[in-house]
Image: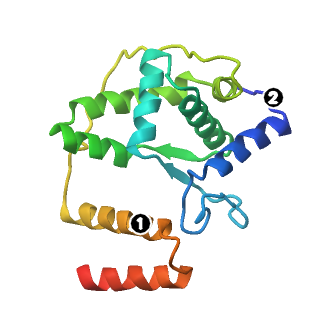
Amino acid sequence: MEVIRIHEKQLKAVTLFLVEKEIIFHPTISPNGYPDFTGRYGRRNILIIDRNIMTKIVEFCRTGIMKGSYIRKLVSALLFWAEFNNIQINGGIALNEYAIEKGNNVAASLENNIFLKMFDQYSPQIWLDVFEGKTDFIEVIKMDNNHDYTFAVENEHYLMHLSELIYLFRLYQNDTLEPYQKVNAFLSWVDEYS
């Protein structure tokens, strides 16, 4: 276990950056993009990343560079923040999406191998250094052992939940409805289509 020294102002800068960007959503912890873990001490939390973030993480780890200072800062902030707060990051849905798009598991398995090795190879200090602009580069991940995974599984249950998630996000983005109207709209939609 590596011990690193983090100043309060560094953690605050990362957290405020993520809050300002409103990229972390959860129905109870972060319904508006502002994480609030009040009352959740000791509970296990998982951060599910989407395909856009997954692609950038894998690109960064595979090449050691990431074009675009904004996305580099965003990805490094997310990786540092999650690891510092002991939040597990999961890219399974992103990899499933990729495997279905490709029609096989080969590329998704390679990405998953890189993603999993990232947690062993990189210290939170590296992500903090990238976030703070102290470095723009990371050491490239060298893959020794690749494992095959099965991601290309598309079934009715998965598609149902995916469509619910998309509809919920559309409702979230709708500024013309009050929160109770959004809940009513969602429940009506579920009733009509399930």
Q: Can residue 194 be seen in the rendering of this structure?
A: no
- Give the class, few, some or many, for how many residues have Cα within 10 Å of label 1's Cα (few <14, many ≥20): few
Q: Is residue 26 above or below residue 179?
A: above
Label 1 secondary element? helix
Q: Is residue 176 above or below residue 92?
A: below
Viewport quadrant of the N terminus: top right
So how many labels did they put on this image? 2
Task: Name which of mark 1 and mark 2 comes first in the sequence.
Answer: 2
Q: Which mark is residue 120?
A: none
| SS at badge 2 | loop
Query: Disc 1 or disc 2, which is closer to the eye?
Result: 1
Say which of 116 and 191 sits in front: 191
* Residue at the farthest left position: 103
Q: Which residue is mark 1?
A: 170
> Marks 1/2: CA distance?
41 Å
Marks 1 and 2 close (CB-CB < 8 Å):
no
Q: Position of residue 166 (x, y in %)?
A: 36, 63
The answer to whether residue 134 shows anywhere in this view is yes
Q: Which residue is mark 2?
A: 5
Residue 167 drawn at (x, y percent): 36, 68
Task: Give the class, few, some or many, for how many residues have Cα within 10 Å of label 2's Cα (few <14, many ≥20).
Answer: few
Q: Amino acid at mark 1?
A: Arg
Q: Residue at x 51, y 79 (%)?
A: 177
Camera-nearest residue between 159 and 116:
159
Residue 179 horizontal/vertical position (percent): 55, 79
Furthest toward the front, the residue is 176
Q: Quadrant of residue 84?
A: top right
